[in-house]
Image: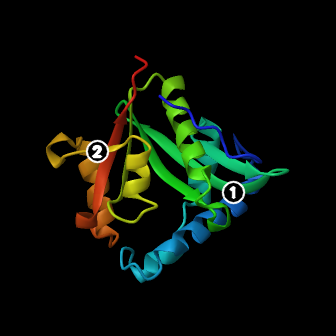
Amino acid sequence: MSIRRPPAGYMITGAAPEEIPALIEIDLAAGKVFEGTGLLPEAQLGDHVPADVLREAMRSGHLHVARHGQGELAGFALTSVREGWLYLDQISVDPAHGRGGVGSALMSRVMLEAKDRSLKRVTLSTFRDPPWNGPFYRKNGFKELPRKKMEKWMIEIESIQDDNGLIVRDRCFMARRLGWL
């Protein structure tokens, strides 16, 4: 596994409870890249990860943040463990810090989290085509899972996405097998 270091001037750390409002602002800003794509219902463009979810992820070691300079928040990765897989629930990078390696550095931290938790696979659900979704994850070693290889919990997530207005035919589950066990 190739670990990407954060770009010069950035670091990946944990978050503090008082930073939750700023993390929500990053999530909202990152979501704006979907405006005009037709991939998200208009009502969902203003959605964000709830504060209580961020707080719990912080407590359980499932929240990693990218910082710039003297600590300015630039992005975050939110994970959870699901039946022996590390699931990337969300990765959000403030567009002001985008396209410079911050997302890839966060992905590397997620891979290290999987190693720390002795998990062999990382998975996620994403849109196939936007460059900041499917192609980004493919560049980071992920492969699309054929439907017949999806776990029951993945089908449940897909159903929730469908119920929330996401066009699931434009989405896929991707996984990366990790070789340290």
Marking on residue 155: none
Q: Position of residue 151 (x, y in %)?
A: 24, 41
Label 1 – label 2 distance at C-alpha: 31 Å
Give the amino acid type for the residue marked by disc 1 in the picture: Ala
Q: Position of residue 107 (x, y in %)?
A: 52, 43
Q: Secondary structure at mark 1?
A: strand
Q: Position of residue 131 (x, y in %)?
A: 42, 62
Q: Residue furthest right?
A: 70
The residue lying at 43 percent from left, 83 percent from top is: 36
Label 1 belongs to which residue? 74
Q: Position of residue 7 (x, y in %)?
A: 68, 46
The residue lying at 33 percent from left, 69 percent from top is: 166
Q: Quadrant of residue 150?
A: top left
Q: Residue furthest left?
A: 148
Label 2 belongs to which residue? 153
Callout 2: few (<14), some (14-19), or many (20+) C-alpha neighbours within 10 Å? few
- Label pair 1/2, CB-CB below 8 angstroms: no
- Name the side, left or right, on which 17 lies relative to 37: right
Residue 61, placed above or below residue 135: above
Q: Nearer the viewer, mark 1 or mark 2?
A: 1
The residue lying at 49 percent from left, 76 percent from top is: 45
Task: Give whichever of discs 1 and 2 has the lower sequence position.
Answer: 1
The residue lying at 51 percent from left, 31 percent from top is: 2
Observer-nearest of 162 and 35: 35
